[in-house]
Amino acid sequence: MSEQVAWMQNEELFKQQLLIGVEWQYRVAEYLLRQNITVYVPKATFRKDTSEIGQYADQVDLYAAGLPIEVKSSKRTFTGTHDVFKPLIVCSKSSFDQLKKPPYAFITISRETQAMVVVRSHSYPNWVVRRFEDKKRGITDHFYVVNDPYIYSIDRLVDYLQRKMEWSGVA
């Protein structure tokens, strides 16, 4: 059994990490709402047991101006693109590779400062795979990482989403 599957079968740890993720996706949603972006957060659903793991692969955290967005939180401190840790972890390779359609973007939010940075999925050809130890989950896994110039400010995403809404007549 792979380490990835082993941690996902630890129901208590899996649900604990999932609830942390839900908390941070709502913080991002609230921020986007304050920027007058239309946001939809799908109802959080949880698997009954590990037999349902694959059924949740294509769920996204939220939709902003109709675009699917994934939210990742980090314990690392940063205030923007200039001081975010690099290379920036986008997501686990296994999670991204099983997606039928990737989200428009990944937003990483600092749990310490609540600052956010953005990586658009279209930059995927420029991502690199790195192996990291995840001490919380007790595994070593492969992750997609990225460097400048593919890390954007949250302001740049907000500006795009506001223009998208104006062009579509929503704003």
Image: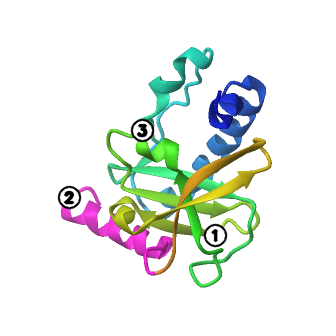
Taking the view exactly as shown, the residue that stands out farthest to the left is: 168
- Label for residue 115? 1
Q: Which mark is in front, 3 or 1?
A: 3
Disc 3 is placed on an element classified as loop
- Taking the spot 47% from the left edge, 35% from the top edge, the residue there is 42
Image quadrant assignment for residue 20: top right
Name the foreground residue: 7 vs 2.
2
Dot placed on the residue nearer the N-terminal end, 3 or 2? 3
- Label for residue 76? none
Whether residue 30 is visible to the viewer of this picture, yes or no, is no
Three-letter amino acid code of the residue under disc 3? Gln
- Label for residue 169? 2
Q: Measured from the top left, where is residue 151 in percent x and y?
A: 48, 74
Q: Main secondary structure of the magenta part?
A: helix
- Label for residue 98? 3
Q: Which residues are magenta?
A: 149-171
Q: Residues within 10 Å of mark 1 (few under 14, many from 20)?
A: some
Q: Measured from the top left, where is residue 111 in percent x and y?
A: 73, 60
Three-letter amino acid code of the residue under disc 1? Ala
Q: Which mark is in front, 3 or 2?
A: 3
